[in-house]
Image: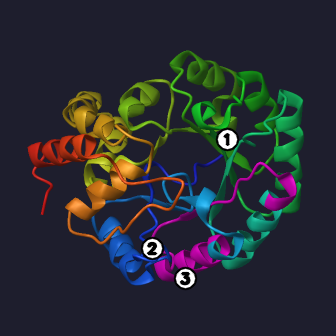
Amino acid sequence: MKEPIFTGAGVAIITPMNADGSVNYDEFGKFIDWQIENGTDAIVVCGTTGESSTLRVVEHNEAIKWCVEYVNGRVPVIAGTGSNSTACAIEISKEACEAGADALLLVTPYYNKTSQRGLIAHYTAIHDATNLPLILYNVPSRTGVNINPETAKELSKLPRINGIKEASGNLDQVKAIHDLCGDDLNIWSGNDDQIYDLMELGGKGVISVLSNICPQAAHDIPAKYLDGDKEGSKELMDKYMKLAKAMFVDVNPIPVKEAVSMIGFNAGPVRLPLIEMDEKNKAYVKETMEEYGLVK
């Protein structure tokens, strides 16, 4: 049995930016404090929502190091260190290990993609070059490659492959992964609208976009389930479903960065090639946020 790095909700945290596109560390610190004070179980830094794909390597490494030092052990820090280049992923992962991260989140190779055998070779190379627990990250809608259940089973044999962030949206696949791997591979939802469904299939929680604006609710949905209050978990999931879906009216993290600004933080702009929402989507996000009493 592999103890999960965390249970509950780890926030897939945004990276606040200044107007010139540089990282706004002052605001980042305020936002992390608020997250921890309001129930976040882990900080997942430099993931998809943190705009890792538009951070230069030096910025990426700096953001991870800064985050680890700022959090200072209050909750686990999971560093997004994946790449479509195995060598680059190893380089960033080693930096995160040296910085003191608690675990690494590794997206599948994208664009050039690979075969299932290639995925096993890729993750094995990173595993063998590092010394931290690893979380596989499966999001085929973005990467164009899927971690098949049999591949997850093979990777679960590696001692520091701790789990998988499953964002395929395919609940049959999640069930197959759990059936094959059991306690050798923890599963976290990568989709906020499927938290409850994934918990029903043996999940340990969620790596959450919604947590950026509702950390306590995102924590409570899986926490209630794990505490035996399935009904309470389902009620909360139903309550926050509309808001969770609203965070994806445009490409993540465009809507959630706008939403974070609406709750009173200076999230700043997204980096090109991402661009701010059009007025229609912006109005919809604001209207939905107002329904939940979140707009400051």
Q: Secondary structure at mark 1?
A: loop
Q: Nearer the viewer, residue 154 or 159?
A: 154
How many other residues sit within 10 Å of disc 2, few (<14), some (14-19) or many (≥20)?
Answer: few
> Which callout, 2 or 1, points to the residue nearer the camera?
2
Tell me what residue is drawn at x 39 percent, y 79 percent: 29
Q: Nearer the viewer, residue 214 or 255?
A: 255
Which residue is tagged 2? 74
Mark 2 or mark 1: which comes first in sequence?
A: 1
Scheme of colours in the image: rainbow
Mark 3 or mark 1: which comes first in sequence?
A: 1
Which residue is tagged 1? 1
User: Which of the image's four quarters has the C terminus?
Assistant: bottom left
Horizontal side, residue 85 vs residue 288: left or right: right
Circle 3: residue type: Glu
- Between the residue at mark 3 and the residue at mark 1, the CA separation in whole angstroms equals 30 Å
Mark 2 or mark 3: which comes first in sequence?
A: 3
Tell me what residue is drawn at x 26 percent, y 64 percent: 261
Which residue is tagged 3? 69
Task: Give coordinates of residue 294: x percent, y percent.
Answer: 15, 54
Q: Which residues are magenta?
A: 60-88
| Relative vertical location of residue 180 with respect to residue 211 in this rendering, above or below | above
Circle 1: residue type: Met
How many other residues sit within 10 Å of disc 1, few (<14), some (14-19) or many (≥20)?
Answer: few
- Between the residue at mark 2 and the residue at mark 1, the CA separation in whole angstroms equals 25 Å
Q: Are marks 2 and 3 in contact (CB under 8 Å)?
A: no
Circle 2: residue type: Arg
Task: Give coordinates of residue 1: x percent, y percent.
Answer: 67, 41
Checking the image for residue 199, the label placed there is none
> Which callout, 2 or 3, points to the residue nearer the camera?
3
Q: Indicate the quadrant where residue 150 lies.
A: top right
Quick check: can you spot residue 79?
A: no
